Amino acid sequence: MLLTELRERVWRANLELPKNRLVTWTSGNVSGRDPETGLVVIKPSGVMFEELTPENMVVVNLDNQIVEGTLGASSDTAAHTYVYRHRPDVFGMVHTHSNYATAFAAAGKPIPVYLTAIADEFGGPVPCGGYARIGGAAIGEEILRSIGHSPAILMKNHGVFTLGKSPEAALKAAVMVEDVARTVWLALQIGQPDELPTEEVAANYDRYQHRYGTAKASQGGGDEG
């Protein structure tokens, strides 16, 4: 069986989607790209999450051809492979329909930087791309056109896509975008939040991405856990 370790990681990441209430029924998917072969492991189409196993993950090449697997690949496979072909730094992707983030996508609105947590994780607003039809490369094209340096994008009338250096990193971004979307929505029920100044966004992003979790950073304290 090809890519045993990557199959296991992608399978485990897929199981985290319903666990974190990011998907319902069979919607959503996680994929991972092998850095050596370029092959992609992705969730099979239309399978309940509790029925997923490492063995029934589907292996495809970057031309969307099934290399190994008895089930059909996710309907979002062409979007994933398009991104992988054009972003050599990306080795994991997640797609969800998580409620609060997808509400912003339905309205065609980005998530502004109202929170330090948004600055930390995304380095700016979570952008909203235009509508693109499911099933082909159009979604992947729009992701790359609109995502900028963010690890997450809302796709208008559709849902959330996140990118990462691993399936686990893309999963984290998917969890975080839903968390901040919920908080922003709640804040908007109270009043109009203020966006963080550009210099504060940059400072928070730099601290979180480059110094957070290190011994040096911990000596200086911080409020992000």
Image (cartoon, rainbow, N blue to C red):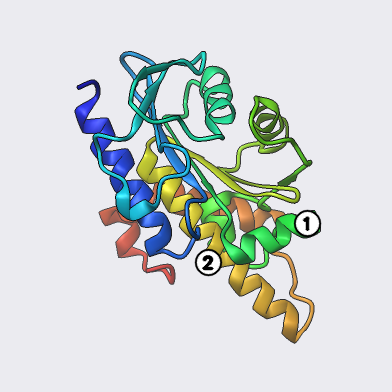
Residue 219 can be seen, yes or no: yes
- Image location (x, y in percent) of residue 5: 21, 32
Q: Quadrant of residue 47?
A: top left
Near-viewer residue (164 or 154):
154
Circle number at residue 55: none
Query: Split into 4 quadrants, where in the image is the C terminus?
Result: bottom left
- Image location (x, y in percent) of residue 223: 43, 72
Query: Split into 4 quadrants, where in the image is the N terminus?
Result: top left
Crowding at mark 2 (Cα within 10 Å: few <14, some 14-19, many 20+)? some
Residue 145, relative to residue 212: is it above or below?
A: above
Q: Quadrant of residue 83?
A: top right
Near-viewer residue (124 or 152):
152
Taking the image as shown, residue 216 lies to the left or right of residue 117, namely left
Residue 197 can be seen, yes or no: no
| Residue that appears at 33% across and 13% down | 37
Distance, label 2 to label 1, CA atoms, is: 16 Å
| Residue that appears at 44% across and 30% down | 72
What residue does disc 2 label? 179
First in sequence: mark 2 vs mark 1: 1
Near-viewer residue (196 or 30):
30
- Image location (x, y in percent) of residue 183: 60, 73
Residue 167, relative to residue 100: is it above or below?
A: above
Crowding at mark 1 (Cα within 10 Å: few <14, some 14-19, many 20+)? some
Looking at numbered disc 1 in the image, what kind of residue is underneath it? Lys
Question: Tag 1, which secondary structure?
Answer: loop
Looking at numbered disc 2 in the image, what kind of residue is underneath it? Asp
What residue does disc 1 label? 109
Taking the image as shown, residue 24 lies to the left or right of residue 101, namely left
